[in-house]
Every structure is written in structure tokens, then in C-alpha cells.
Image: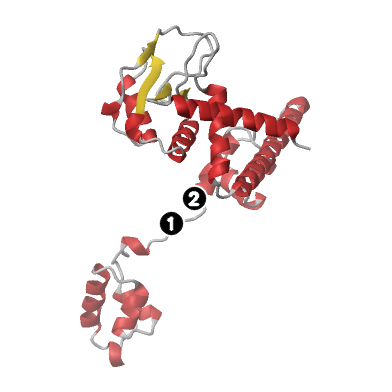
Amino acid sequence: MTAIHGKYADFEGLREQAIALRREGLSRRQIRDRLFVDNNDILNRLLEGEPPPEWTKRPNAKDDLRDKARELRLKGMTYDQIQVELGCSKSSISLWVRDLPKPERRDPSEQAKLAAQKRWEHELVIRDVERQKTKQEAFDQIGQLSDRELLIAGVTPYWAEGGKDKVYDRRESLKFINSDPNVIKLYLRWLDLLQVSRDRLRFTVSIHESADVPAAERYWAEIADVSPETFRKPMLKRHNPKPGRKNTGETYQGCLAIYVTQSADLYRRMEGTWYGIVFSADSAT
């Protein structure tokens, strides 16, 4: 063993300090700077047999890629396919999977199908990006609604979905039902514009009898920003399951019906506004 002289003469004392610092969680660089050890061989001897703290151990960034590459190889993918999937070099892939059996050579027609599927998946991603871009552009064009624009925006869905007065059945009152929470929010905002206070609203959930009614009432109460205790007795529909029916499961919340008390005048204004919209659209040049 090489003799140690000079500032490292008290090697054992220095080693005790180095080990104590290591056990406190210091890195090699921190210990070197703290003890003024500028010789790596000496530092190695000072820390010999002492494991590094956990935080200094760097994970191998390629471990996950390697495992994924082996998984894909076992599924029968070629080097080219794995490279496209993971974005790493074929030389690395070869090193990682060289001990695995080569995949069976695929039928040319099957390879063509896989290639076509890959191109289609790529095309779907592009289409989805374009779809979202178009929606965002349309969203950005709206901006802040004026009171007049909100008035028109609220009348239109009401005329499509709300209760209407008939010559043979006079019902001049506002009653609206819908399953879309955003449509409900728009309708409530429209009622705010018309200065309809919340205490004039009556809420009822319409839902299949097999659903979780209390949960649906809590859901719609949160959407409407009211207490579930204010809801009237729910309108339950007989459970008659049909093949392909979508309104089932935990996401099914039924519909929310909103009735406005003392709303005959509001109904007439709504109907007059609607026909004003229709007339204006017909006469537009």
C-alpha cells in the first residue's frame, strides 16, 4: 500500500470524518470539498466499503425503453417497428433484444395490413389535431357575449327543447328539460338575464328508476348551484333496457327539468323574441 504523507498523514482520522459525512447523506463531491481532498485515489480509499446514499444513485434512463423494446420484440415486432414505436436507435434495440428469439416471418399480406393500420393510426392523430384546432378557432371567435346575444342564445334552445303553448293546450309558462349540463347552465344564465330569481325555480330530476337518484340530484344541484333539498319528487321512468342503450352506468345522470313560477309574461316575451329572430333571418339580405 502506498504510504500517505503530508495533509493526509492522519488517514484514519480523515476516514472517520469522511464516513460520518457519507452517512449524513453527503455526495463524494461534497465530502471532497468539506475535507479538502483533491486526490480521487485518496477519496476512494477514505470511502472504501461505504455505500453511497440513495439520492445519489441515478436511475438508468434507458431501463424503461429496454424493457418496452423486449416486450414489443416478444410480440413479434421487427427492429424497424420497435424503432418507430420507441424512437430509439436500431443498434440499441439489437443490443437489448439479441438474446430473444427472432419473430416468425409474417405473410406479406399481413405485413401490408399492419403497415396500412399504422398509417391509418397516424392519419387519425392528424385528423384529431385538425379537429381540435377548428374547435379552438371557433371558440376564440365568440369572445364575451352581449346581453342581446345572450338573449338570442337562450331563446333558441328553449324553443327547441322547452315546453310550448298550443292553441289546443294553453300552457304559457317556462318549463325546460335537458340532459346536457352546459345547456342547463346556459338556460340558467338566460334566466338571470331576465332577472328571474332562484326562489322562483322548481327543479325535478327525470331519470330511469334503476339509476342512483340521490346521486343524480346531487349532480344537478351542483350544476344549478342550489341545494339538493330544494328538488321536487323525481320523475321516474320505467326501466326497460334495450340493446345498445347508452344512458346507463355511473355517468348516467338523467335530465333536469326546470319550471319557472309566475312566468306567463316571460313565456310570451320568449315566444315573441323567437318569432322576431325567425322574421329577421327570413328578411336578411
Which three-letter amino acid code belongs to the residue tagged 2?
Asp
Q: Quadrant of residue 202?
A: top left
Pick the front one: 209 or 86: 209
Name the quarter where the N terminus is drawn.
bottom left
Q: Picture coordinates of residue 185 (x, y %)? A: 45, 35
Q: Position of residue 31 (x, y in %)?
A: 31, 77
Residue 70, relative to residue 25: is it above or below? above
Residue identified by numbered label 1: 59
On screen, residue 97 above or below 282: below
Q: Residue at x 73, y 34 (%)?
A: 115
Front residue of 63 and 130:
130
Q: Residues within 10 Å of mark 2 (few under 14, many from 20)?
A: few
Q: Say whether marks 2 and 1 touch (CB < 8 Å).
A: yes
The disc placed on residue 71 is none
Q: State left or right for residue 61 relative to residue 18.
A: right
Work out whether residue 177 can be spotted: yes
Mark 2: secondary structure: helix
Quarter of the view holding residue 261: top left
Check disc 2 and report the residue beneath it: 63
Picture residue at 22% right of the left edge, 80% below the top: 12
Tell me what residue is drawn at x 50 percent, y 48 percent: 64
Residue 66: x %, y % from top left: 53, 47
- Residue 93 visible? The answer is no
Which element type, helix, strand or loop, lies under badge 1? Answer: loop
Q: Position of residue 138 (x, y in %)?
A: 64, 44
Separation of disc 2 and disc 1 at Cα? Answer: 8 Å
The amino acid type, in three-letter code, at marker 1 is Pro
Residue for point 60% across, 49% down: 95
Query: Looking at the picture, does residue 177 appear above or below residue 224?
Result: above
Q: Residues within 10 Å of mark 1 (few under 14, many from 20)?
A: few
Q: Which residue is outermost to the bottom?
A: 6
Relative side of 243 to 105, left or right? left
